Image (cartoon, rainbow, N blue to C red):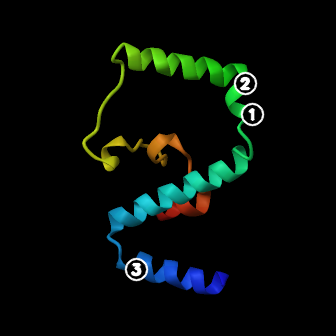
């Protein structure tokens, strides 16, 4: 099953534009981060994350945010994709 799935992914990637492949790699980086750091949601209830959450809510309430017309406009520089997720070294080399 895994070999068949990998074959489908490779064929699909071959059909995508370079920009679309970058988006796929960014999403893979997010999935890797999530699987490492988000096995449960206890991180959210830590003091640090509660402070960040409330700060973000305040920013939104006071209009301190930026809107983008498309997903690509939201990506960050420095090898980080959307949401600032750092890709693994192997993926980073491909971006």
Are the residues tagged 3 and 2 within 8 Å (C-beta)?
A: no
Residue at position x 74%, y 47% in the image: 39
Dot 2: element: loop
Percent from the top left, x then y, of residue 24? 46, 62
Are the residues tagged 3 and 1 within 8 Å (C-beta)?
A: no
Are the residues tagged 1 and 2 within 8 Å (C-beta)?
A: yes
How far apart, in angstroms, are the residues tagged by discs 3 and 2? 42 Å
Percent from the top left, x then y, of residue 35? 69, 53
Where is residue 88, by image quadrant? bottom right
Judging by the rendered image, the residue that carries numbered circle 1 is 42
How far apart, in angstroms, are the residues tagged by discs 1 and 2? 7 Å
Residue at position x 58%, y 21% in the image: 52
Judging by the rendered image, the residue that carries numbered circle 3 is 14
In this rendering, the answer to whether 28 lies above or below 72 is: below
Q: Which mark is residue 46?
A: 2
In this rendering, the answer to whether 31 lies above or below 16 is: above
Q: Is residue 89 left or right of residue 61?
A: right
Residue at position x 56%, y 23% in the image: 53
Dot 3: element: helix
**Of the residues tagged 3 and 1, which is closer to the observer?**
1
Viewer can see residue 73: yes
Q: Is residue 87 left or right of residue 23?
A: right
Percent from the top left, x then y, of residue 34? 64, 49
Q: Quadrant of the N terminus?
A: bottom right
Residue at position x 52%, y 16% in the image: 55
**Of the residues tagged 3 and 2, which is closer to the observer?**
2
In this rendering, the answer to whether 27 lies above or below 46 is: below
């Amino acid at each position: 099953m895994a070999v068949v799935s990998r074959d489908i992914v490779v064929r699909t990637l071959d059909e995508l534009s370079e920009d679309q492949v970058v988006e796929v790699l960014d999403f893979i980086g997010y999935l890797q981060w999530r699987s490492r750091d988000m096995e449960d949601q206890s991180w959210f209830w830590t003091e640090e994350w509660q402070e960040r959450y409330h700060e973000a809510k305040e920013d939104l309430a006071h209009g301190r945010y930026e809107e983008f017309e498309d997903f690509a406009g939201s990506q960050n520089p420095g090898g980080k994709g959307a949401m600032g997720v750092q890709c693994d070294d192997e993926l980073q080399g491909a971006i």
